Amino acid sequence: MRIVHVSAECYPMAKAGGLGDVVGALPKYQQKIGQQAMVVMPMYKTAFLEKTSWDVVHKGDAYLGDWQFNYTIIQEQSGQLGYPLYLVDIHGLLDRPKIYGYKDDTDRFIGFQIAVVDWLKSWKEAPDVVHCHDHQAGLVPFMMKYCYAFQQLASIKTILTIHNAQYHGSMGWDRSNLIPKFDAWKRGMLEWDGCIHPLASAIKCVDKVTTVSPTYMRQLKYQSNGLEALFEYEQGKCIGILNGIDNEVWNPDTDPMINHHYHLENFEHEKQKNKLEICTKFHLDFNKPLIVFIGRLVHEKAADILPGAIQHALDKTNCGANFLMIGAGETPVESALNYLVQLYPGVYNTYIGYDEKIGHEAYAAADFLLMPSRIEPCGLNQMYALRYGTIPMVRDTGGLHDTVIDMGDEGGFGIRFLNANEADVVHAIERSIEVYKDKPKMQQMITDAMSIDHSWESVVNTYQSVYESIV
Ligand code: GLC
């Protein structure tokens, strides 16, 4: 099968979050089971772009409203990623350093999608499946089906994977001139809530909708930022498939970003060495449990409750644990987290920013990973943590529900709490401090955690059966 993934992110070319990790790994494992999977994404000006060699494979032109633009498709030359990676270069529109955050993001991603569909039209052998990820690729199915210029693509099967239904990409009808001429009777297939709505349009137009965990799929029917009724109505074509992780990149036994490698047999000593290093680097107390947070400091991840909860927990337990907070995001949250550094020297520190290496070092060093997320479609960090023998402390939602069993339950290896609020986080911290003292229990939980297999190998087969159900 020829599968074309269309996405705004793909690691290592460009990543803002888990979407990039997933789109960077899924096609590699699809190739391993014999599929011809590939990725097409915008050409941003990233470090990976500069240091990689590219071949030009196609040149074309199209219209974005009144603006006639030229686009170029380039392909990564060496094949080092394990799948073909294609970039869409639209000069002046996409070739910028950041992925998102420009005033004209709507135009940028519509332009990207028009170029993708226009390019697909020129293929001698059409793909079997066009697999779109999130709203930045959400107009592709509509364009393939209902825009006059792309009619020859109308019978190709399409899939939407939702990594986060909080973001919709919606815009007013005044922007409809940006979309290539379409059958006006099909206006309804673009619309939700009186807007042009890329995510809703994709849900309506595709053959299958997947999201990144079964629990999140269920939750979308009552919590999806206004799309609840649509998910209820379209539930017949919806399925939740838990993400995998790239076990080659995330392997504590070979990870080039960490100093002391370990596996199931020797983690007791070797993981401790990583802990000692990070505790020294961030002036923390090696003898106390180390709890880390790694992620975007945003409302969705409930980062705003962390400063209060940590302060409360440190006071209540007489500084019974260490905290290292890693991430960037909303300025008030960053400031509140930084403020605590002076209040709790020796047991609390922050790294405001995003650095892949520090992330890996933290998974390898920490005893616990805290994820109080309000919304978590899948969550990859808890799976990385499990692989590195770091016990996840998670709010019971979305993919966190599907991947973490509380230590109080049979077969449990983690800590799960019900609400994204201070009281529940404080209680979870107290439980972590308690269990940390129980060495045999900790060893058992670490062993159980590290033995869990969340690799893509098994997940790709589930995607494969979804493709087969429609092709
Ligand atoms: C988004 C979600 C996250 C998920 C990731 C990959 O970033 O917020 O929960 O793991 O996409 O699908």
Image: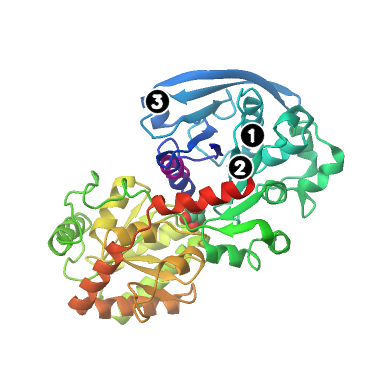
Q: Quadrant of residue 60?
A: top right
Identify the residue position indicated by label 2 in the image. Answer: 136
Binning the other alpha carbons within 10 Å of mark 3 as few (below 14), some (14 to 19) or many (20 upward) gives few
Upstream in the sequence, badge 3 or badge 1?
3
Mark 3–mark 1 CB contact (< 8 Å): no
Please state if 324 lies on the left or on the right of 403 as rendered: left
Q: Quadrant of residue 11?
A: top left
Q: Residue at x 63, y 66 (%)?
A: 223
Binning the other alpha carbons within 10 Å of mark 1 as few (below 14), some (14 to 19) or many (20 upward) gives many
Q: Is residue 164 above or below residue 302?
A: above
Mark 1–mark 2 CB contact (< 8 Å): yes
Q: Nearer the viewer, mark 3 or mark 1?
A: 1
Decide whether the magenta segment is chiefly helix, strand or loop.
Answer: helix
Find the distance from the CA under tag 3 to the CA under tag 1: 23 Å
Q: Which residues are magenta?
A: 23-29
Upstream in the sequence, badge 2 or badge 3?
3
Which residue is at the front of the view, 101 or 218? 218
Q: Nearer the viewer, mark 2 or mark 3?
A: 2
What label sits on residue 113 in the rendered view?
A: 1
> Type of residue at label 2?
Gln
Is-magenta flag for residue 116?
A: no
Identify the residue position indicated by label 3 in the image. Answer: 50
Which residue is at the front of the view, 247 or 137? 247
Mark 2–mark 3 CB contact (< 8 Å): no
Binning the other alpha carbons within 10 Å of mark 2 as few (below 14), some (14 to 19) or many (20 upward) gives many
- Label 2: state its secondary structure: helix
